[in-house]
Amino acid sequence: MKTFTITELKKETSTVLDSMSKDSYTLITQGGKPVSLMFDIEDMDLEQVIIEARRYRARLAVETMRKTSKERGNDTMTMNDIDKLIAESRAEHRTRLTQES
């Protein structure tokens, strides 16, 4: 995988694009951290690529939520615990709405 900084991408866009081959990815970094991953989609269905990218990001979000839940011990909550938490949250919301009126 080839890596370019965002500054290189700005200054040498055509070089970066030319460096992408059909089988590889190009990583863009900013301040030493990855910010973007580029790959050639010339022979792909753009809508399908977008759908799959969104699906992947959603899957990562769910995995992150599960991990966070487990770290906080929320993965052992019963339905009664969950219902109680929802009721408390709704009551707080109603109180806030009443105070704002």
Image (tube, rainbow, N blue to C red):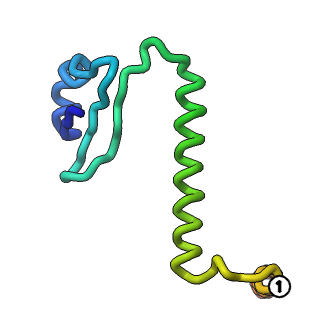
User: Mark 1 highlights which residue?
Assistant: 80
Taking the view exactly as shown, the residue that stands out farthest to the top is 43
Residue at image position (20%, 37%) is 3
Can you give x and y, in whole percent of width and height, for residue 89 in the image? 75, 82
Residue at image position (51%, 78%) is 71
Residue at image position (53%, 72%) is 68
Apparent side of residue 91 relative to residue 39 in the rendered image (left or right): right
Apparent side of residue 50 relative to residue 93 in the rendered image (left or right): left
| SS label for mark 1 | helix
Residue 41 visible in rendering: yes
Give the mark count: 1
Can you give x and y, in whole percent of width and height, for residue 70 in the image? 56, 75
Quarter of the rendering occupied by the C terminus:
bottom right
Apparent side of residue 10 relative to residue 60 in the rendered image (left or right): left
For mark 1, does the 10 Å Cα neighbourhood hold few (<14), some (14 to 19), or many (20 or more) residues?
Answer: few
Residue at image position (21%, 21%) is 19
Q: Quadrant of residue 51?
A: top right
Can you give x and y, in whole percent of width and height, for residue 54 in the image? 57, 40
Is 59 drawn above or below residue 79 in the view shown?
above
| Residue type highlighted by circle 1 | Asn
Q: Quadrant of residue 11?
A: top left
Quarter of the rendering occupied by the N terminus:
top left
Q: Nearer the viewer, residue 73 or 4?
A: 73
Is 3 drawn above or below residue 47 in the view shown?
below
Q: Nearer the viewer, residue 45 or 74?
A: 74
Can you give x and y, in whole percent of width and height, for residue 8 in the image? 16, 34
Residue 98 visible in rendering: no
